[in-house]
Amino acid sequence: MQAFKAQRLVVLDANKCVGCQLCMLGCSSRLGYAGPAKSHLLIRSAGGIERGFVVVVCRACEDPPCSRVCPTGALTNLPKGGVRLQSSKCIGCKNCVEACDIGAVLWDEELEKPLICIQCGYCVDFCPYGVLGVEAL
Amino acid sequence: MNGSGDWVKEISKVLYIDLSKKTFWSERREDLFSKWLGGIGVAVQLYKEETPREADPLGAENAVVLAVGPLTAVFPMGSKVISVFKSPLTGTMAESHAGGRAPAAIRFAGLGAIVIKGASERPVYLVIDGEKVRFKDAGTLWGMRSAETVGRVLREAVPGAGLRTIMRIGRAGERLVRYANVIIETYRHFGRMGLGAVFGSKKLKAVVIIGRKSSKVPKIREYRQAYAEILEVAKGPATKKYHDLGTAANVLPLNKLGALPTRNFSSGRFEGAENISGEKLLESLSRRLSCVGCPVACIHLAAIREQYEDEKYFYKVENVPYDYELLYSLGSNLGVSDTVGMLKLIKVVEEEGLDAISAGVALAWATEALEKGIVTKEHTLVELKWGDWRSYAQALKYIVEQPNDFYKALAAGVKVAAAKYGGEDFAIEYNGLEPAGYHTGPLFHLSLAIGGRHSHLDAGAYGMDEGLASAKAKPPEPEEAVKTIAAEESWRQVLNSLAVCLFGRKVYGPSLVVKALRSLGYETSEKELEELGKKIYLERHLRKLEEGFRPEGVRVAKRVLETPTPLGNVSEEYIRRGIAAFEEMIERHRKLQAP
């Protein structure tokens, strides 16, 4: 497993979100893909775009419900919060998706595996309006 | 395009849907996507394959094509989907472009294009999830008063939040108003040329598309580099106008120039311009929105806070999108200077699913026809008076409901209405399409006569006029003007095939386009792209000619010639010579191309 900084993604001000999804496209491009569907965060409307947007990012919970319900140990807790997915152990049961109350465990429809944010902050620089940031854990 | 391999394969799937038989299938059309890139280039070819030349625009034979291109949702401002269909306003092949989430949803449903043919005998809506199509009963949605409500119902009925588009028509489309539009998400549209009426004729209420897929980028390093470069330019001065005040920024400069069409093009200056300006609307600005993949956020919403008359402790707050064209068509061109009143008119066209430009020009003609006694209140049912937005709000609903023959004619466009009642001198249209709001000079009006879709965006010729006016220069001879207009319109065919937003035209210069395409594995050059643009330009025009379009038959309303522009009065002779030069040019190219 690669080394990483103990940090997490935060939503600084969802009111400034314009719904461009450049963060999602940026996240996918980190893995070499185009298109929003490989993104590990989700921008969706708050019941129609006239009401603005919901910025769904993983909170890097200290005691993450997603890893507790994983039957195969594919999700490992990190020391200061958040999880890492070991894809080879994942059987695609979607328990983690169900367990996350904020809907931050997204789903890769092509691979049938969860998409869980690794808190790398790569998306932050793509946001033109400063909606996203990172903070140290 | 040579050696464009994997990416062409990636975007070449065409989904065919037959509404008559309720069937669907998909085919790889690498032949089309390798030769014509995507977007408008491919859509014209698919339309030619599917729609007979003599097809009735409102008949089952008229196929609707929606197409995206290699840069759609892959690069910043790659945010357009192109629709091609036969227009019930012009009777020939037409196109309308839209943004929102539709381009990304189509592209990442794994599709390059969608062809919708046939007609359903009862109202349906479509849910497209990847290559699968479900035909759903739209009996409950049909006839709903507000297209916004239709959107709300579908949002709850269909999965895929964040990755989907919801296109729908309003009552205007159901009732075949020839300039009904298709609303996308809530504030974007296939606005022009009547795609909404074509949907309505097919009993197609809505199309929901969910894009859950992705594409592996062939040259990821080059891609990231090109992406970063484009994003930087897209966030800079090249798009500043659209970012700051939005297109509403046009109102005051055009008014100062004397090019803001006012009271049915009887003047280029509006005394109430301040009230409908981007600067004024800033006071009500409530939210900014972007299409997927665009950093500009040009979509500006104004909030109206309104007290209920009967319940003074109740208020409602509504968001209304505004853009320059609406401020002209429902503002200055109707003499409406009440800011809130104008926003309420925009609200009505949004709820009903009307093309705001055509609707506004139709009402402007009707107002003048009433003023001049050509028609009476028996016809108009309400007292149409410049500036009286309440009457206009009612009249917009009458256009949709068509309670009498007069409104039936008005719902068919200003050309049809004037042919029936008279007043053709002040019926402003080009080949049946009501124009956008720039009385800038001869190049603009000529471009509307000879443009592929008779749209201000075909060549942006208002900008050419404005340039001449600010340099205090004279317009070129019409033969020269045609060359300039055709060159610009040809390059725009490349942008519309990629398919990127035309607001990004200063971002996507030829060299950056080549760079972006190369990172996706295309081997191409600026020269090759320019040649392709010319070919597509010609294809569009040839098809219209085959369908019976006669450029020399395009009428220029007397009013256009009478009202001075910043470049003086436009002369009939200028336009006629321009049209003749255009026809000659097309004929020359056709002969060169013939086998």
Image: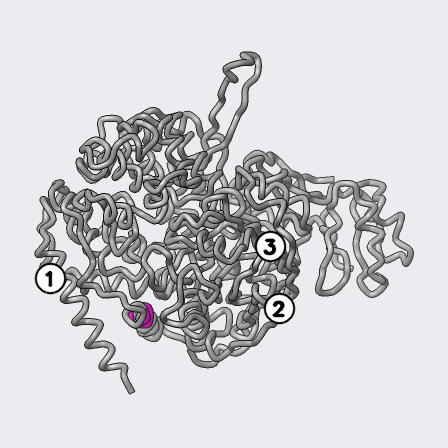
Q: Mark 3: which amino acid?
A: Val
Magenta-span inclusion, residue B51: no
- Mark 2, chain letter? B
The residue identified by callout 1 is: B577
Marks 3/1: CA distance?
48 Å
State whether residue B516 appears in this view.
no
Residue located 36% across and 61% down the image: B94
The residue identified by callout 2 is: B23
Residue located 48% across and 42% down the image: B187
- Mark 3, chain letter? B
- Mark 1, chain letter? B
Residue B248, image quadrant: top left
Q: Where is residue B283 in the image (x, y as percent from the top left)?
A: 41, 25
Q: What stretch is highlighted in magenta?
A: B539-543
* Label 3 SS: strand
* Magenta span: chief secondary structure: helix
The residue identified by callout 3 is: B124
Residue located 40% across and 64% down the image: B56
Q: Position of residue B41 (x, y in %)?
A: 40, 69
Q: Mark 2: which amino acid?
A: Thr
* Label 2 SS: strand
Q: State which tag comes first along the sequence, 3 or 1.
A: 3
* Label 1 SS: helix
Magenta-span inclusion, residue B541: yes
